[in-house]
Amino acid sequence: MPTFRSTDAQLFYDTAGDGPALVLLHPFPLNHHFWRAVAELLSSRYRLIVPDLRAHGDSAAGEGVVTMEKLAADLAQLCREERILKGYFVGVSIGGYLLFEFWRRYREHAGALVLANTRAGAETSEGRTNRLALADRVLREGTAGFIEEMLPKLMSPATLTNRPDIVGQARAMMQKLSPQDIAAVQRGMAERPDSIPTLRTINVPTLIVAGEDDSIPRGEFELMREQIPNSVLRVIPRAGHYAALEQPEEFSELLRGFFHNIARPA
């Protein structure tokens, strides 16, 4: 895998295919392998750039909390490394959080956005308290209990019942993170800014994707659809918060249909 240096961290990413640049940003606490099945379906049409986000997979965490500002700066540096003047960006969960920050700071690179299984609002007071407590607990007790608690919340009942292979893939990716990595990312998500005021400023084609059984309430997706001009919301059946991993064919088909109708980026 190629690597690059972004401020205080060495970061890894993968590339595949040829065509318009398409950057795929995985959710917490997984890594670029989250996109394996989707990448196989899209690499004949796009030049895929698939990073391990800071503190995930093989990428280092750097110093301190993994903030959305740091993640957005990492993505901007990746655009420079891969000479992406303007590309398509797909962000799942934390990948969506960082895309809001990326839009505020580096929007000149964005030709289109896909905001999947994510939300625009800042963390609630209760959610922030829970994330900080979870960070402390993982540092005390390790990651095993955290992982087993997370898995049922992130996938649809159909996946949990019928696809132990997919559940196993997610577990293996989660196990790559150290307690320190998980704590740094949880603390960063706890302090993520409110991106609702940003929504009306997004003036590129935007697709919003939800899982039918997503852990994020449907109203959060409707809010983004209402506030982002000319955006489109699609819901993937038999999928939870990890829709692209659970239903890669449906997810890929949505991306192909969406990107087919917009201008080719540089």
Image: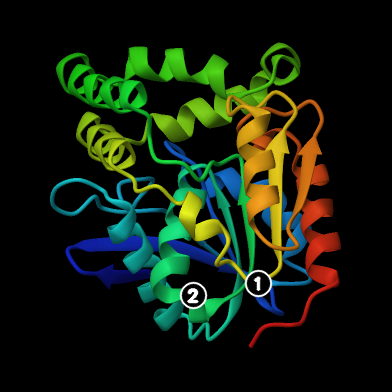
Residue at (31% x, 26% y) in the render: 125
Q: Nearer the viewer, residue 178 or 256?
A: 256
Residue at (34% x, 53% y) in the render: 68
User: Neighbour class for label 2 at 10 Å: few (<14), some, many (≥20)?
Assistant: some
Q: Which mark is residue 204?
A: 1
Residue 123 visible in rendering: yes
Gap between marks 1 and 2, in whole Å?
Answer: 10 Å
Residue highlighted by disc 2: 107
Residue at (82% x, 43% y) in the render: 250
Q: Nearer the viewer, residue 203 or 41?
A: 203
Q: Amino acid at mark 1?
A: Val
Q: Is residue 264 left or right of residue 62?
A: right
Vertical comparison of 205 with 52: above or below: below
Residue at (53% x, 86% y) in the render: 85
Q: Position of residue 48 (x, y in %)?
A: 62, 68
The answer to which image quadrant residue 184 occupies is top left
